[in-house]
Amino acid sequence: MSAMSGVRLIGGELVAGSDLGGVLPGGAAVTALLGRAVPAGSRVLLCGPHEERVLEWLLDRRAHVSYLVRSLPDAQEIALRRAEDEELAVLCGGLAKMEGEGPFDAVIAAGGLTRLNTPDSSPLTWAESLEVLTGLLAENGRMLLTADNGFGVHRLADPDPETAENWQVEQDPTLPGDLEDFASRLGVGSDRCFAAYPGPFAPTLLLGTERLGDFALAGVLVARSLGVRYARTPVLFDPGEPAVRALRQGRGADFAPGWLAVTGPEPLPSGLAVEGHGAWSVPVELHRAREGWERLPLSGEAGAAGLALRDPALLAGPVPGGRLLEDELVEACARGDLPALRASLRAYAAWLDGQPSPAFATPRDVVFGGEGFEVLDPSWDWAEPVPAGLALARSMWLLAHRLCSGGLRHPWPATLDLTAIATTLLAMAGRPEDRIHLREAVLLEAAITAVREELSPAGQSRLAADLEEGASRTIPSHRDALIARRRALAELEESLRRTDWLNTALLEREAELRDLRTELAAAKKETAAARRDLARVKDVLAGAQRDLKAVKENLRTLRGSRSFKMGRLATAPARAVRRVRP
Amino acid sequence: MVAQSTWGCQVHHGNHWYGHAHVLARYCGLDESRPPRMPGYLQHGWNVLNGFGTRHSFEPGWSRFLWSERVRRRGLSLDGHDGRVIGAPWNYLLELEPEQPLSKREGVIWYPFHGWEQQRVIGDHKGLIEEIRDVETGPVTVCLYWLEYKDSGMRELYESAGFRVISHGFRGNNYRYTDTNFLKRQLAELRTHRRVASNRLSTAILYGISVGCEPAVYGDPMVLDDAHPVFGGVGRLRRQWPELHGERVDPGRAREIAREELGTDYRAEPAELRELFRWPAAEEGR
């Protein structure tokens, strides 16, 4: 015992390095399950670093906690922080040195067994580690243990899987093969196990194995959980898609990032989901109801921040089943199924009109199933009224944004930008006039997201700018990048071919223009010559007219003379005879 | 009405044939006598290929505006070129010109398979007249392509059989002489007939079905001079749509097929078309 630090060194400790960085094992969902594994006042072994709230929960329940960590700096930090807690003993060293400790009423290892090894003792395999832990349990002792699924979508989609410590067992042959194997190694049935998403150790979603078969609900929850986790993380491909497909094919547990088991007799919920981010997060238990499933929120404190109001109690009740509307719409776009898209958008717009809080009913928040459209999380409200037209404009902008920023396949030409696609979607929904709300809709989305994701004012304005430009907050996966690259290359090639075409057309037109100019010059020359001829003719004609005028004048003078009149008189009879006998 | 020439600011004059661009402009609330430029190639007739002829050359980079999903798929498989399905302009005309109640329908309007300016049709019109007489019981209107209508011998041949002979007009060429009443005239004629028939499954048959005519395809299908083999000939039409061939066909199934082939369900809203074509907003007071 190092009295100075309050840490008991058991041997094999890591003298440098820390496991306290990053997201620690635990989270609201795991904490919510602790009650089933830890009776009040029991002796608990907390194996490996865990999130602070796990320790707090245990100490609140007056548990006598032995907290085993392998890193000395970590152990000292924890002991310092928790110096006042008499029920806490911080142990530092390798799991191999734990033999003879205990017994414990409960062993909690939500971070798996890998981080319990240290280089000083020969590394224990998974099976050996489990054996040590089992040996530490009192009679009827319980265990909460998580296993990382090496074949989980989180591993498959990881672009850089080199994370194992170089002194650890590389390919541990004793790792559990699947969820059934994991359960039987713990000596329980698979009904004591959950599939964990989006990662094995700090899950926001735990689905009981019976739950996995209910695709209508599980699919939505799994896609949402992975979507939030991987929104800003580089991946090889979007892990949500294969995870959901695995569920549909009855292989959900095989591809789940992790498995969590709770031994003991306490009844378990069918699932646990954490609704909301950060301070807004509320763990919700899922239970089988007579028809479908029911939600039971575990903390019911209503709260408000900015214009957002939240009452977690409203989560209680039947869970909406169906498919996420956004997925349906994106799929219809990819298929080019415009009639289906139009029908869905119209139905959605009509439904949105009647919604009391349309600000929290975007296609991302809504499922479409047997009961029609339903809001997945009805606990939110917005203090200012949001007109249905504005809400629809926001929804269509978000859909257009997802299509454009994700480089997803859609039935419109590449020349249509974000605004044009959002306007088109509004027209398809039968509400073309709502396009006047599009700008306001972007600001509303930024405001709502800022409150829900606890963004800073700077973060909020950056988000608004990203939304407006069509930039993506999501980092595309390698697969997305390949698709986008192929698309960009095709567009580039088309542009180059178009340039060639225009160039050829231009050359043809230039040749044509040259010919026309030559013709024009010749025609001008001819016209000038013709003009000159015409002028000459006019001169001649004018002279002739002058001559004619003079002759006419002479004639008139002659007719007016006396001798002409006498002559006419003398010849009159002869003219009369001529008229009679022509 | 003959539309003004707007050559020089258009993508392809085929977009103006039959006044298609004009119908779409009117649907979008724009001046139908001067349709704005359409940024792509509009399919101008029903077609068993990619929506265009084999002789059509495409300027790269422009969209293709197609009638049906099937045509889009064919285009993708033939030359990898995707299209935008908006449905036939005919659908938009029907929206603009709803049917008047109590219109009396009788007889058949018969469209002998026609060639065009660069391909003649080889066939026996006398034999065809006999077949029409054998099948049809009511009055017969024969609608000839303008080239054949100009041929007084051809006209007299059908007139002497006691048939009424008409032509819907000239589809236009290079933005000149575009008869923008072509489709309206065709629509008015179809709506006064009980049946529509031809010796080839063609655009007119589908138009007729869409406005409630009973369709029939029978008689010598005739042969198009120098037809490209990719079209697959008459046999392909019969294999693909056997339900539409014969003197009497099932009208329900015919309506389904016409709906698919004319892309009726793909008719876009005016605001959608304006975005797609990058056309201006509707004009005031229109």
Image: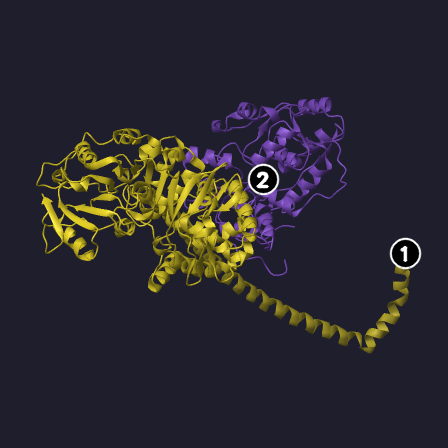
Chain colours: A yellow, B purple
Numbered circle sitting on residue B225? none
Q: Of B35 and A354, which appears nearest the observer?
A: A354
Give the percent coordinates (x, y) of residue B45: 56, 38
Question: Which residue is at a point 18% across and 57% down the rendered structure image?
Answer: A83
Quarter of the image holding residue A538?
A: bottom right
Secondary structure type for disc 2 = helix
Q: Is residue B183 left or right of residue A234?
A: right
Q: Of B235 and B165, which appears nearest the observer?
A: B235
Question: Which residue is at a point 57% across and 24% down the rendered structure image?
Answer: B238
User: Which amino acid, by three-letter code, is at mark 2?
Assistant: Thr
Secondary structure type for disc 1 = loop
Quarter of the image holding residue A43?
A: top left
Q: Is residue A29 above or below residue A195?
A: below
Q: Is residue A15 left or right of residue A478?
A: left
Q: Cβ–Cβ below 8 Å for labels 1 and 2?
A: no
Q: Is residue A398 left or right of residue A550?
A: left
Would residue B162 be visible to someone looking at this image? yes
Q: Is residue B219 above or below residue B146?
A: above
Report the chain holding disc 2. Answer: B
- Residue count near mark 2 (Cα–Cα under 10 Å), binned few <14, some 14–19, many ≥20: many
Q: Of B238 and A94, which appears nearest the observer?
A: A94
Give the percent coordinates (x, y) of residue B176: 58, 48
Numbered circle sitting on residue B264? 2
Would residue A13 be visible to someone looking at this image? no
Give the percent coordinates (x, y) of residue A574: 88, 63
Q: Of A380 and A128, which appears nearest the observer?
A: A128
Numbered circle sitting on residue A581? 1
